[in-house]
Image (cartoon, rainbow, N blue to C red):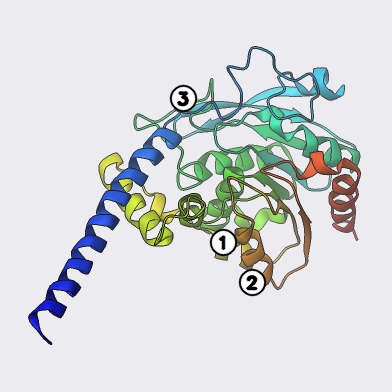
Amino acid sequence: MNKWVRRIIVGIVIVAVLFIAVGGVGTSMLMNHLLTPGGVDWSGANNPDPPTDPYELGYRGDPRAALGLPFETVRYATELGEAEAWFVPAAKMTGPWAVYVHGIGGIRENGYRQLSILNAAGIPTLLITYRNDKGAPSPQNALYSFGVNEWRDLDAAVSWMLARGAPSVILVGESMGGGIVGQFLMHSGEADKVVALALDAPALDFTEVVADKIGARMIPLARTLATAGIFIFDTYRRAELSKAVSLDAVAKFPGPLFLAHGTTDGLVPVTISERLVAARTAPTTYLQTAANHLLSFKENPGRYRAEMGGFLDSLGR
């Protein structure tokens, strides 16, 4: 090999390494902005004119104000302190109870679409808060971790439900809430109490979420840059985002799964749900829509209600 060929190869390697290093740093800086609570108003908390429709994301109001449903404000003990939840009783108190887990920077009210379906099916439901939510306890190193840490708060909520009389549990999660559900299945000692899952646009592979955002900008080596960025971020923020992958745990869950995801989702790529469906062997109801992130219900409320409602009804058979 002549010296010019060697120089070209060395030059290409140097450029590639620099590209990955610079791209990784840029990715980690963007992650720091997006994953630090308050960096982005994910839930519309600062919206001066919030929607009046309880099925719209960003609605503010308790279950009675939103849907006319009686509820109880309860508190459950987490490792960081007490967190608040709304408990909505229903007709079938002796059957499984559901717990709703919102997404990144979200609020309990985001769950009113699912709550309306769960309540119609007679299923008692707990809408929880968890670390870094407004009014909830937060760690010193406050970060959204796509379930790696938040699952412990879900674990505390499930323990509260079981102590209150729930014979079994249905986990309902959206977006990052799906990642929290997945990490719960991986780590919780109460995972065997879960009889069904209902997920909407679940973020079960954080690396794929980041890579999708990079690839959407036509930047090459998206998965490599995502991996490098997560490594850098984990190192300087003392985080563990590289562990935020729970797709296999949900795929192996032996109970039935309801899954909704839109093909134009701009936050959590639909490829995650497609991989999940392909890997599942247990009963799976997959509602694929053309909607953007968490808008499958809005695209066709009647269809969403029929699909999820039928899924819930089948649990009693």
For the question of whether residue 122 can be seen, the reply is: no
Q: Is residue 317 above or below residue 162?
A: below
Q: Quadrant of the C terminus?
A: bottom right
Q: Residue at x 57, y 50 (%)?
A: 203
* Among numbered discs 2 and 1, the one appearing first in the sequence: 1
Give coordinates of residue 225: x percent, y percent: 36, 56
Question: How many numbered discs sit on the rendered protein?
Answer: 3
Are the residues at dot 3 and dot 2 in contact (C-beta closer than 8 Å)? no
Relative depth, front residue between 215 and 38: 215
Mark 2–mark 1 contact, CB under 8 Å? yes
For mark 2, give the secondary structure: helix
Residue 113, position as x, y percentages in the image: 79, 36
Q: Which residue is mark 1?
A: 247
Q: Nearer the viewer, residue 78 or 165?
A: 78
Q: Which residue carries the number 2 mark?
A: 279
Q: Going from the N terminus, do you reach mark 3 or mark 1 first?
A: 3
Secondary structure state at the residue bearing disc 1 = helix
Q: Mark 2: which amino acid?
A: Ala
* Disc 2: CA contacts within 10 A as few (<14), some (14-19) or many (>=20): some
- Residue identified by numbered label 3: 38
Camera-nearest label, 3 or 1: 3
Residue 107: horizontal and vertical position, in percent? 63, 28
Residue 86 percent location from the top left of the image: 70, 27
